[in-house]
Amino acid sequence: MSENRKLFGTDGVRGRANRYPMTAEVALKLGQAAAHVFFEKNSSKRHRILIGKDTRLSGYMFEDALAAGICSMGVDVIHVGPMPTPALAFLTSDMRCDAGVMITASHNPYQDNGIKFFGRDGFKLADEIESEIEALVLSDSLLEHRAPADRLGKATRIDDVEGRYVVFLKNSIPRDITFDGLRVVLDCANGAAYKVGPTVLRELGAEVFVTGAEPDGRNINEDCGSLFPERAAEWVLKNKADIGIAVDGDADRVILIDQLGQILDGDRVIALCARQLQESGALKGSGVVATVMSNLGLEAYLEGLGLDLIRTQVGDRYVVEAMRKGGYNLGGEQSGHIVLLDRSTTGDGLMTALQVLSVMARDGRPLSDLLPEFVTRPQVMINIEVAHRTPLEDLTDFQEKVREVEAEMQGQGRVLVRYSGTELKARVMVEGPDASFVSQSAENLANALKRALA
């Protein structure tokens, strides 16, 4: 990714709502730039861009600003309202739109928001296209491309798209499988899945206990969803459920809970899916794609299955890029983004949960019996709020402390320090064979980084 980019991070444009770059003014220009980039100059067809959002209060402001910008360039807008990010990706392709725009800050608190783009194929945009959009936003050249008054775009709203996505999800599992008799807890994080999540599970026959489905614009991700799976775990035990499903605010990630209340992160779900796909002969590429954050225990488990673990930088878009390049159909992140490329173009929390539920229904076995057995290495990550992103390589004293920790682990562990691509935070991760050493080292390095950035 280009180092001189000022707007786009690892997953679109993101920041505090009503503060640069997440302002209505920037959103309007982003809409104009995207419309210009996706406008086919020699085509006589009407161009259309889809806009969806999660349940944040600021979503109203951004969808109107984006729509104004897009229409000013002679491109039509279709509003679909609150909808999971993977639903927006699917609908963009399914409805033959030129592009899709999702307004969401995913797992961030409600005060934040973001704008991410999808191409007509339903995949997130390549860096080169995002850079082209960004260059237009940061220049004055958009003024000369605005449409004349008789060619302005129009905005419409479609209300039946939830049903399209529900059918898409249901078609991702065998038609002879139902969830009759299964008790399911679903935590929607007061986010975009609050309607479609319970609907698809109930239509497939499950008895559903729903929490986090009362969004008010401010409670998205608040003590609920995939960031706080303990809540869903409590509901599983209280309702004697067979499984708990906790998605985040835009439902592109998922954390699962078995009937005993055990919490399964993305690494464990990836391992489960890898074994199931391998046993059925459906796994492609003889391996799995994950990020540098995935635990070494997952890597060792996959090696035991004769599978490779291909690592990328953090961000599900980079996982997808590596999957497409290498011919893999399973990838994901420890945080719960699971990408099933034969079925979806991006991480889809609900779809991932349906695949696991279908195995439970087919085999008639509890989730705890299906879990892959591997030992995770002790791993500690500490987040540090920062005012700016000073290049880590310039912090020479801090880098020396990192090398000291790595040397003490003698090749049996690792240290990863990076800036978040979605928040003004630095993340310090230490992983190794000794839990006490890992915890103390992570704390020491976090404190050292704070001093270096002061």
Image (spheres, helix red, strand yellow):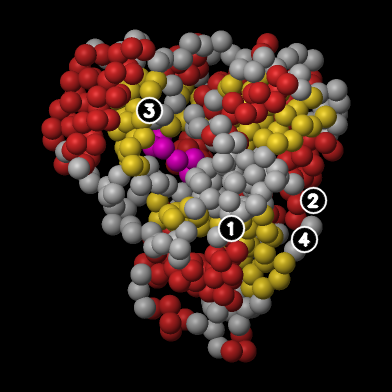
Q: Earlier in the sequence, mark 3 or mark 4?
A: 4
Q: Earlier in the sequence, mark 3 or mark 1?
A: 1
Q: Position of residue 242 (x, y in %)?
A: 74, 20
**Residue 311 shows up from this direction:** no
Q: Are marks 3 and 4 in contact (CB under 8 Å)?
A: no
Q: Nearer the viewer, residue 404 or 272?
A: 404
Q: Amino acid at mark 2?
A: Gly
Q: What residue does disc 4 label?
A: 159
Which secondary structure lies at badge 2? helix
Residue 282 found in image quarter: top right
The residue carrying pointer 2 sits among few (fewer than 14), some (14 to 19) or many (20 or more) residues within 10 Å by Cα, namely few
Task: Please provide the residue range marked out in magenta.
Answer: 312-317
Q: Nearer the viewer, residue 26 or 76?
A: 26
The residue carrying pointer 4 sits among few (fewer than 14), some (14 to 19) or many (20 or more) residues within 10 Å by Cα, namely few
Mark 3 or mark 4, which is nearer to you? 3
Q: Amino acid at mark 1?
A: Leu
Tell me if residue 315 is in the magenta stretch: yes
Mark 1 or mark 2, which is nearer to you? 1
